[in-house]
Amino acid sequence: MAYLVTGAAGFIGFHTSQKLLERGEPVIGVDVVNDYYDPALKEARLALLKKYPAFTFHRADIAEREDMEKVASLHPEITRIIHLAAQAGVRYSLINPYAYTHSNIDGQLVMLELARNLKQCDHFVYASSSSVYGSNEKLPFSIEDRVDHPVSLYAATKKAGELMAHCYSHLYQIPSTGLRFFTVYGPWGRPDMAAFLFVKAILEGKPIKVFNHGDMRRDFTFVDDIVEGILAVASGQPSGMAVPAKVYNIGNHRSEPLPRFISVIEESLGLKANIIYEPMQAGDVKETFADIDPLVKDYGFYPKTSIDEGIPKFVTWYREFYKV
Ligand SMILES: NC(=O)c1ccc[n+]([C@@H]2O[C@H](COP(=O)([O-])OP(=O)(O)OC[C@H]3O[C@@H](n4cnc5c(N)ncnc54)[C@H](O)[C@@H]3O)[C@@H](O)[C@H]2O)c1
């Protein structure tokens, strides 16, 4: 039995693979290592994973059917899939929309076909996103809420991924679970996200851009909590349903005002930010806040890390990694 983890060189895929390996589980990692952000960071994550003898890596594109069929045929031991590879980022979907259909739609289909053709697929767990809630005003966001009005192509592809997974669960009885992640941050984090952008700019003495004039709130979730949730879900499977497909939110269940997030970063760095306030950006949403009750009820998951604990951990990693 082994886990196939896609996006293993990415932020969440790296942490997920590492935790599985620490637990003694074999991991087959797949990633195309694209240059959406600095590939050197992805290579540095991979270098750590490659130290574990139970880690096997394939540099492959999940949307390339034949390449993925080859990976599956080389590893008949795969019984569980944690599918995290995707074109992430809301803002970039306005610049390069085809990257999103390629990785998030074509890639999702190839991964579902792969799951369908495995001798045994105990669980197909995949990343969705809080962005599917669009500009919904009812808070906290619940999996019972309608999510038919995405405000970015990224969100539309993530919602499409949920529909495709539901369809495959219905047609082929593949147990599938989609996890809607809420703004994940932490060590080895993504350079296009707020925590990274803010810390980098403040350390370089550059201004930070804050959108909607700072009137934004986010449910910031520390990466260790996300990984704990992913692994709790991946080691079980949806049961007792005609169609074994489920979707959950994974968030911190705290919606933090952006100015407070920035103050915690300032405190942690011992430096003041030079803030430039800007209007709301197209595709962005004003507030996110996760209702995580279903995940607590079904899997006993509860996030532990506040931004007061999580941000200093990110800052420590950043300063050590970039030697600043
Ligand atoms: N980080 C967050 O806050 C957040 C929030 C919501 C949802 N998500 C989702 O979680 C998942 C992981 O996100 P992340 O933050 O680790 O992003 P990431 O960009 O760090 O990781 C994604 C990885 O997938 C790889 N990849 C992209 N397209 C690929 C393809 N066609 N074939 C093979 N590999 C490919 C990239 O090289 C990258 O290493 C994604 O599905 C993302 O949409 C993340």
Image (tube, rainbow, N blue to C red):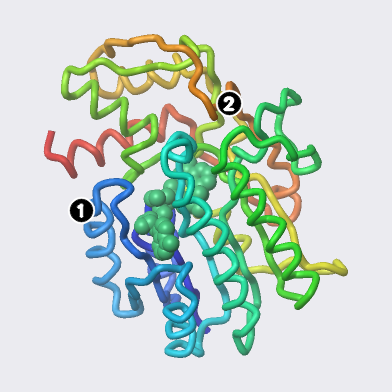
Pick the residue in front: 146 or 313. Answer: 146
Image position, residue 98 (x, y; %): 47, 51
**Kind of residue indicated by mark 2:** Val
Q: Is residue 11 above or below residue 94?
A: below
Residue 223 visible in image: no
User: Which residue appears farthest toward the left when viewing the image?
Assistant: 323
Give the left or right position of residue 219, taking residue 26 as reference.
Answer: right
Residues marked 2 and 1 touching at CB (< 8 Å): no
Circle nearer the N terminus (2, 1): 1
Q: Which residue is mark 1?
A: 40
Q: Which residue is mark 2?
A: 285
**Kind of residue indicated by mark 1:** Ala
SS at mark 1 in the image: helix
Image position, residue 181 (x, y; %): 56, 45
- In the rendered image, the quadrant that contains the C terminus is top left
Q: Is residue 132 above or below residue 207?
A: below
Pick the residue in front: 295 or 120. Answer: 120
Residue 50 occupies quadrant:
bottom left
Residue 231 occupies quadrant:
bottom right
Residue 291 occupies quadrant:
top right
Image position, residue 62 (x, y; %): 46, 68
Residue beneath the point at 31% across and 60% down:
33
